[in-house]
Image (cartoon, coloured by chain):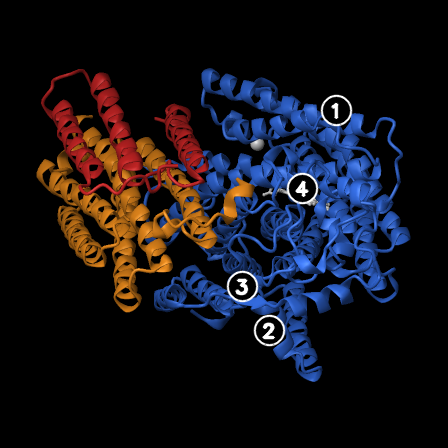
Chain colours: A blue, B red, C orange
Amino acid sequence: MKWSEFFVTGEPLIYAADVAIVLTMVGIVFVLTYFKKWKWIWNEWLTTVDHKKIGVMYIICAVLMLFRGGVDALLMRAQLTAPNMNFLDAQHYNEIFTTHGTIMILFMAMPFIIGLMNIVVPLQIGARDVAFPYLNALSFWLFFFGAMLFNISFVIGGSPDAGWTAYFPLAGNEFSPGVGNNYYAVSLQISGIGTLMTGINFLVTILKMRAPGMTLMRMPMFTWTILITCVLIVFAFPVLTVALALMTFDRLFDTQFFTMANGGMSMLWANLFWIWGHPEVYIVILPAFGIFSEIVSTFAQKRLFGYKAMVYSIVGIAFLSFIVWVHHFFTMGAGPEVNSVFSITTMAVAIPTGVKIFNWLFTLRKGKIRFTTAMLWSLAFIPNFVIGGVTGVMLAMAAADYQYHNSYFLIAHFHYVLIAGVVFACFAGLHYWYPKMFGHMLNERLGKWTFWLFMIGFNVCFFPMYFLGLMGMTRRMYTYSDGLGWTPLNVVATVGAVLMGIGFIVLCYNIYYSARYGERDMTGDPWNGRTLEWATASPPVHYNFPVTPIVDDLDAYWVMKKKQGGFQVKEEELKPIHMPSNSGRPFWISVAFFVAGFGLVFKWFALAIAGALFIVLGLILRSFENDDGYHIGVDEIKRTERAARKGA
Amino acid sequence: MGTNGHHESFPWKHLIGFVLSLLLTFAALWVALSSGLPLKAVIVVIVLFAMIQASLQLFMFMHVAESDSGKVQTFNMVYSFFIAVVVVAGSVWVMQFVL
Amino acid sequence: MGEAVHRYDETMPLEYRTEENRLNILGFWIFLGAEVVLFATLFATYLVLFQRTGSGPTAQELFQVKDVLIETLLLLTSSFTCGLAIFEMRRGRLAGLLAWLLVTLLLGIGFITFEVREFIHYVHEGATMQTSAFLSSFFVLVGTHGAHVSLGIGWMIFIIIQLLQRGLTVKTARKVFIVSLYWHFLDVVWIFIFTLVYLLGMVV
Ligand code: HEM
Ligand SMILES: [Cu+2]
């Protein structure tokens, strides 16, 4: 292979990106060396098994990916602003909507949610860490290197261009001969393995490590949603694993799963993809519901209305979300029986979702509402999400879907659920838990600016798309001709996208500004919270709780504050605390995955095998390891606690 | 929850499980190849036999219901089999329209 | 559940005695749940595709009862002997445990040998993974199972080494128990391969 084929060439945008990447790398190396931070970054971050630090790293990656996906989005909007534009050509447009969709869902929404759950869940249930801290680190690094592998496709070898759904036969060798879709298959595989392990890890953590007295029905709502999300992860991700493996076989070894000759069935891909894909959308939306529940009840200063109904509806979703997948391809031709059944199950999913809307509304009713930034995001979520949900039910009617399918109506629908649901929740959760993560608040004024810019921009951008869809504009078209009457609404949409972009910039500035000037949180409980994470210092000490809290009601910390004036720790009760040791192995095993993956992408099988051998070596070393962690003595706990609680 | 119980001196449970598995295997073979039943019936019977044999493994060999997580473990297995049936039967049903 | 976790019970089998062990075992069970779905997806693929033979041979032309039966009996017996290994472990007998693990290992290797021979035979007949959708899905389903068994063999060898080095401890007991779960599970999968791939293939 020639160098000119290896590196992507010929586009000014790409050259600019090359330069930017090289400069960033040089910059990072320079800063780390100049400030003598190599040791620090290795000991404190790359080898950490602390759930809070892992969570922070997830969120940093998610924000970076939001940037990358957002730039993709703005490029697409720029191209579509006016008819017959030549800003992007067809091929380039294909690549950009593919990477945009894939990145936003798998490398932005997923890690954002997983980051928040890493930080919050162990604290909410009164645990010292997750069940398998080492595995947790491995999960993160697999996600990280999977994402890296996907992102380098942009400059090395070429991006995937068959859409984030990668339908066959388009994604097969015949129509996508380059390495782009190999990147898709391999990098999603690597990060998917990480996600699966996260699911198992948190399932065990939540089931077995709750503080004494915290029965299932006393669990905070966010923890409940994570529990069910993990069930979905554990039972849905293996389907993706297999689908991607079959895709890899087809592309690398010329098997006949999804081909068009020798019995292959391209539509089977769509079937497998969506068996995973529909639960996947609930994997990102359920935690969002959990985040909103926490925030609404905190800032309405009331217990969540209808806790039990909420729990049952979430459990119902865990079940229903596995039996609706065909609604993503009603138009494929499966016939009236199949379509009717899945049409009905799909409408049934809307019921438990509707229940929850009423829960939030009734929680708000007669509450003493505090309009913080986190609360604004949560309040805005309700009407916006309802718009997304109602249009979803319109799409669920199989016959009607023949009209809406693959039009901008669909684009508007899933952005109304994904942005108004998931992205709003991520921002809300970020503002809400930020003091817990970093010990200082995000500035509220700037936060509200972000909120209004982004929320208004979102509606300006996507609401017109419903009408564009009804006017016949189809999804994934890279340009359109004059005289169709689509131009005005497209201009409006682009304006909205720019507003969202500005909102994002304000958010980034807020992070910088607050780090320098933000109000420090000395209490550990800046919002007058209800759940146990607010019983710890901000940021929590690395063992979280000096003694395990005892829970005797829902809203454990709220009740504690009412009964005992807070979380009381008697120094006599302290016992040595057992903690897991750091390890560099998760990091280098994931590097080996990256190397092996890269080898597969380019069919350099020697490299792939070398990587695989290192993976196996890592597993063997782990098996023979005899490390039981370490203990923190009582004296050290006393010292740490005094220092951490000075301000309280 | 029956993790320890009495220390039996002979692995009766395992032996019974093994013998039953062998019987089911040969029975399935016979039903499929020499019973002369109609195809639909053959399929139903052999799938049923497979399910019984799988449960034998789970309960007699793997002790799925033991330990203080026995309920979770059992539920986990039942749910995964439910999803398995949805995926297999669902896919076959949905994809049958393709010739 | 949450309350009972710190119980330490001398009468429990070794593998359940520490909190860490109990978490690991539960985690592994959940992993097996994921594996069930993984294999279910492969079965779904196979069952959708197995009559789509293109220009290649059909299942009926290919499969041989004798080979399949030998493989089935080897694996089934190995699952039984693996159970005996755990039985010995719970009676605290290291020698018995090691002996039965070794037998299990040999039976497993026997199974893999026969399977590889079967695959080679098919390839010689011109039935490769690239021939048709039926064969792609056959090789990937049965091959994934075979890869799992091979992995299990390697894993078991390392655990035997650890048993020899460290004796029967709370930790090694847990590892043996978990690998035994894995091994039994692979037999569960094989039962369905035997039924849905081979038997079905020979009658449809
Ligand atoms: C920053 C604001 C965003 C804008 C302006 C935007 C815009 C777009 C546009 C123009 C398309 C392509 C439509 C087409 O030609 O088919 C698209 C597709 C898509 N977007 Fe977004 N988007 C944004 C944020 C998001 C977020 C946050 C998510 C997910 C959480 C997301 C998920 C998707 C998906 C899954 C697709 C479909 C990709 C495909 O067709 O393969 N987007 N978006
Ligand atoms: Cu769906």
Q: Earlier in the sequence, mark 1 or mark 3?
A: 1
Asked if ligand 1 lies within 8 A of label 3, the reply is: no
Q: Nearer the viewer, mark 4 or mark 1?
A: 4
The chain identifier of the residue carrying mark 1 reads A
Q: Nearer the viewer, mark 2 or mark 3?
A: 3
Q: Residues within 10 Å of mark 1 (few under 14, many from 20)?
A: some
Q: Which mark is residue A551?
A: 4
Q: Nearer the viewer, residue A58 or C42?
A: A58
Q: Position of residue A488 (x, y in %)?
A: 81, 37
Q: Position of residue A26 (x, y in %)?
A: 65, 78
Q: Nearer the viewer, mark 4 or mark 3?
A: 4
Q: Secondary structure at mark 3?
A: loop
Q: Residues within 10 Å of mark 3 (few under 14, many from 20)?
A: some
Q: Which mark is residue A580?
A: 3
The chain identifier of the residue carrying mark 4 reads A
The answer to whether dots 4 and 2 both sit on one chain is yes
Which residue appears at 36% of the width and 50% of the height? Answer: A249
The answer to whether dots 4 and 1 both sit on one chain is yes
Q: Earlier in the sequence, mark 4 or mark 2?
A: 2
